[in-house]
């Protein structure tokens, strides 16, 4: 399995960092070598960070907690949306709205407005609007849907945030740190690992690199969620005979 994972990471170009001139000295422990002016990331450190993150995410999902996936750069958006949807978790793939976590109540009210506009556009009420009003409503809907659709299921604070490139998502990192929310992040050689709780050293610009790591992290969440579902099902089955016995006892007492 280890050899297979190493091959996957290398083929996806996860080990390619930025130009040496752009590096953050704090990334030195994660750098294997410098070649043609480019830093090469130590794959062993990538695997270590990835396995640690997968174990943690599986535990979070097994507890029934939420994991928020964040990646708004062009290379990351599609993979973030696809993999977060696959593991049934909220995501931000277009734009991080300021206060998404620290001003959570306001964001929830905007989600309420999105649902209200959808109801209007999907019902007979839209016919009572003028063409100009319908056009304005359509514009409002497109903007809200683009920014809010991914966090519809964010009905409570997430236990963890998975981030692609903490430099790009510095506002998300700042809000998570302020609230004590754990951060898991793919970090390139120009990032500061001190800002992330569980760093995964790797190429955060390559599409294949991002897709591969997102897939692994989403699978860890799925494993945890399936474990939680299995435990719940087992608990329900155990509870049924106990409830039946209790009901029978009550009925017997009533007859007496």
Image (spheres, rainbow, N blue to C red):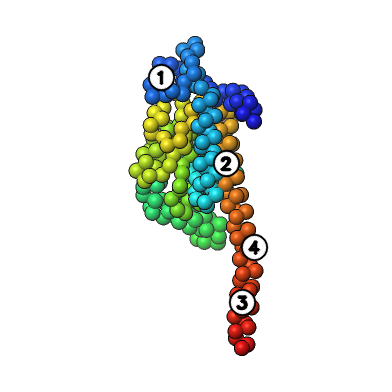
Residue 100 position within the rendered picture, expressed as x and y whole percent measured from the top left: 40, 46
Spatial separation of the CA atoms under disc 3 and disc 4:
16 Å
Between discs 2 and 1, the one toward the N terminus: 1
Label 4: how many residues lie within 10 Å, few (<14), some (14-19) or many (20+)? few
Q: Report the side of 8 relative to 165 (left or right).
A: right
Please, is residue 208 above or below residue 69 in the view? above
Residue 160: x percent and y percent?
Answer: 46, 44
Q: Indicate which label's residue lies in the foreground, 2 or 3.
A: 3
Element under disc 3: helix
Marking on residue 81:
none
Choose mark 1 or mark 4, whichever is in front. Answer: 4
Dot 1: few (<14), some (14–19), or many (≥20) neighbours within 10 Å?
few
Q: Residue at the spot x=48%, y=57% of the render?
A: 116
Q: Which residue is mark 4?
A: 237
Residue at 37% across / 41% down in the picture?
A: 177
Quarter of the image that includes the N terminus = top right
| Residue 247: assigned label | 3
- Asked if residue 142 can be seen in this view, the reply is no
Q: Nearer the viewer, mark 1 or mark 3?
A: 3
């Amino acid at each position: 399995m280890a050899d297979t994972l190493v091959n996957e990471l290398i083929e996806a170009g996860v080990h390619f960092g930025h130009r040496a001139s752009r590096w953050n000295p704090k990334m030195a422990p994660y750098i294997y070598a410098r070649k043609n002016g480019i830093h090469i990331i130590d794959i062993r450190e990538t695997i270590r960070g990835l396995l640690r993150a997968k174990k943690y995410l599986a535990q979070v999902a097994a507890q029934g907690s939420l994991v928020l996936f964040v990646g708004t750069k062009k290379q990351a958006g599609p993979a973030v949306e696809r993999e977060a949807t696959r593991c049934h978790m909220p995501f931000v793939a277009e734009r991080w709205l300021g206060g998404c976590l620290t001003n959570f109540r306001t964001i929830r009210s905007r989600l309420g407005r999105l649902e209200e506009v959808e109801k209007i556009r999907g019902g007979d009420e839209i016919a009572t609007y003028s063409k100009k009003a319908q056009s304005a409503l359509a514009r409002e809907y497109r903007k809200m849907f683009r920014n809010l659709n991914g966090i519809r299921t964010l009905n409570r604070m997430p236990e963890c945030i998975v981030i692609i490139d903490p430099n790009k998502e510095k506002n998300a990192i700042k809000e998570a740190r302020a609230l004590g929310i754990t951060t898991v992040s793919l970090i390139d050689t120009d990032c500061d690992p001190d800002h992330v709780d569980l760093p995964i050293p790797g190429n955060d610009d390559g599409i294949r690199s991002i897709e591969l790591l997102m897939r692994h992290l989403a699978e860890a969440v799925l494993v945890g969620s399936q474990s939680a579902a299995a435990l719940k099902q087992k608990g329900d089955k155990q509870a049924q005979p106990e409830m039946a016995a209790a009901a029978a006892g009550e009925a017997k007492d009533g007859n007496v």
